Amino acid sequence: MHSQNPGRFPVPRVIVIGAGFGGLSAALLLRASGNDVTLLEQHDWVGGKARAVPTTAGLSDAGPTVLTMRHVFDALFAATGARLEDHAKLIREPLLARHYWPDGSKLDLFDDRQASALAIRDFAGSKAAHEFERFAQDAESLFMLFDAPMMQNPEPSFADLARHALSAPQHLPTLLTFNKLTQKLAHSFTDPRLRQLFGRYATYVGGSPLEAPAHLSLIWRAEEAGVWRVDGGMHHLAQVLADRFQAIGGQLLTGAPVHHLEADATKITGVCLKNGHRLPADFVVFAGDPRALATGLLGKDVSHIAPTTKSAPRSYSARVWSFASAAIGPELGHHNVFFASDPASEFRDLRAGRTPTAPTIYVCAQDRGSGRGRPKGQERFEIILNAPAITSKTPDPEEVQTCRQLTFQTLRRFGLTFSPSPPDNALTTPTGFEHLFPGSMGSLYGQSPHGITAALKRPRARTALSGLYLAGGGTHPGAGVPMAALSGRHAAEAIMQDLVST
Ligand SMILES: Cc1cc2nc3c(=O)[nH]c(=O)nc-3n(C[C@H](O)[C@H](O)[C@H](O)COP(=O)(O)OP(=O)(O)OC[C@H]3O[C@@H](n4cnc5c(N)ncnc54)[C@H](O)[C@@H]3O)c2cc1C
């Protein structure tokens, strides 16, 4: 079954399914280690959730917009003997986000703690600035506490985490006393607007501050440590990874949906495409949503894999507008957040599986940012509203119109209007996400991050079936562009270790 390589060890044949960041990272690393790697992607584009849609102003991102932990991508390129900066232009954005409240108040936060503290002092007074500095220091040290034993560790255990936690007793209240992020924030900040702002970071992994564990306050640190804008859009970063993969001899097939995986009594043997073509393999990395395996979408030979994903609660979905238009209103940054007046009502609606009636709205003005002036004429926007994952596949015929009113009437109250209004097909709904990413229930970040042990419950790279591995935001260490890329690294390293041991 190995590729022919006369006179030498046979070259293992690896198939990676799914060209999202997890699959791209696994494919690159496995190819860089000398394997014969084929990357199969059902869509015509690479990047998965980091997709782009055509608009009158060019391709507009319709997925992730915030790139953090750039070092993960520097390391990926370095592993292939290249430098990221020679392949993509990444621009650091000192302004992390511009935040607006219905009462007219506004706050900019920066990648420089002092600059953020000064902005917070002007916004809410010296006490709030001190509270922020304490919170930011705590988030930084929490991030460091979790980085090695959790994110970088392919097989984290409760015991590992407990050992690390005991070495940093200042975090015991976060880990033991406040079980919810919202409780920690109530303790950290006097000003309710700051509680609302820092609580929103739970949505970065598809959760609610009312239910996410307190230690997710560390997400703030990932942003404070640097946010980059990718010239050409986030989808372009996926494209350069795919280009690099091909440049080092990997084979990429797009428009190649996998119908099922094949296994004998002991191990994986290959994959079968929807067109009936069969590809034998020694190793397969499945980098789509692992719930697709458990629900039988990839055939009965692998339906026993990742069984917990079938019943585990799902993370949130979203309604995403992606379009070009001319905007009138406040001076936007690249990342902008328009908060709801009642911070809890949105999350109560989401918990009940309802569309929030008073949403917080994120607006990415893709053509704005540091070093750029205000664009003339039409520019590209991505607007995101949190939504519950789908529970039934019956689309609501009114969904687009309801979402249109909710989005643009809310933004109008902040003085922000768009002309022309985006067409209906500029909206991707939770049902649309389920179609794009089968088995996901429209959920964008895998299993729900709610609960103190949620991070330990995600499927890991190794599976119960020899030769089959998992990667992507639905697996450990979880969702988000850099995390998905780390999951790909975990899968590639597991394969290389297992190869050596066999
Ligand atoms: C609107 C939105 C905003 C986001 N914002 C951010 C952000 O700002 N910052 C951030 O870090 N993260 C953000 N995220 C999350 C981030 O995009 C994801 O966590 C990450 O991109 C997921 O990568 P992945 O490896 O899981 O692969 P995915 O992107 O889920 O891709 C999986 C791929 O597998 C393919 N596939 C599945 N099944 C098959 C099959 N049978 N055959 C062939 N191919 C198959 C799919 O077509 C897909 O291309 C956002 C996500 C969305 C949708």
Image (spheres, rainbow, N blue to C red):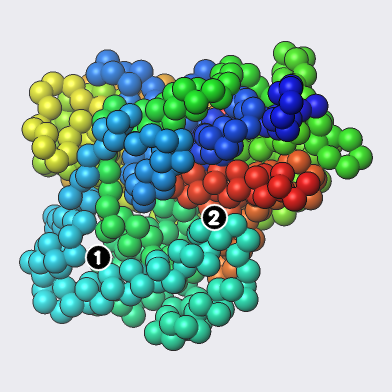
Ligand 1 within 8 Å, label 2 CB: no
Disc 1 marks which amino acid?
Arg
Which circle, 2 or 1, is nearer the viewer? 2
Side (left or right) of 257 relative to 356: right
Say which residue label 2 marks.
Answer: 477
Q: Residue at x 74, y 22 (%)?
A: 6
Tally of numbered discs: 2
Q: Residue at x 42, y 54 (%)?
A: 203
Say which residue label 1 marks.
Answer: 193
User: Dividing the picture into quarters, in which one does residue 5 lie?
Assistant: top right
**Label 2 CA crowd tier, 10 Å (few <14, some 14–19, many 20+):** many
| Element class at badge 1 | helix
Q: Residue at x 52, y 18 (%)?
A: 44
Q: Is residue 188 above or below residue 94?
A: below
Q: Residue at x 81, y 31 (%)?
A: 269
User: Dividing the picture into quarters, in which one does residue 168 lie?
Assistant: bottom left
Q: Residue furthest right?
A: 265
Residue 165 lies, in percent from the top left, at 49, 79
The answer to whether residue 186 shows anywhere in this view is yes
Side (left or right) of 423 relative to 157: left
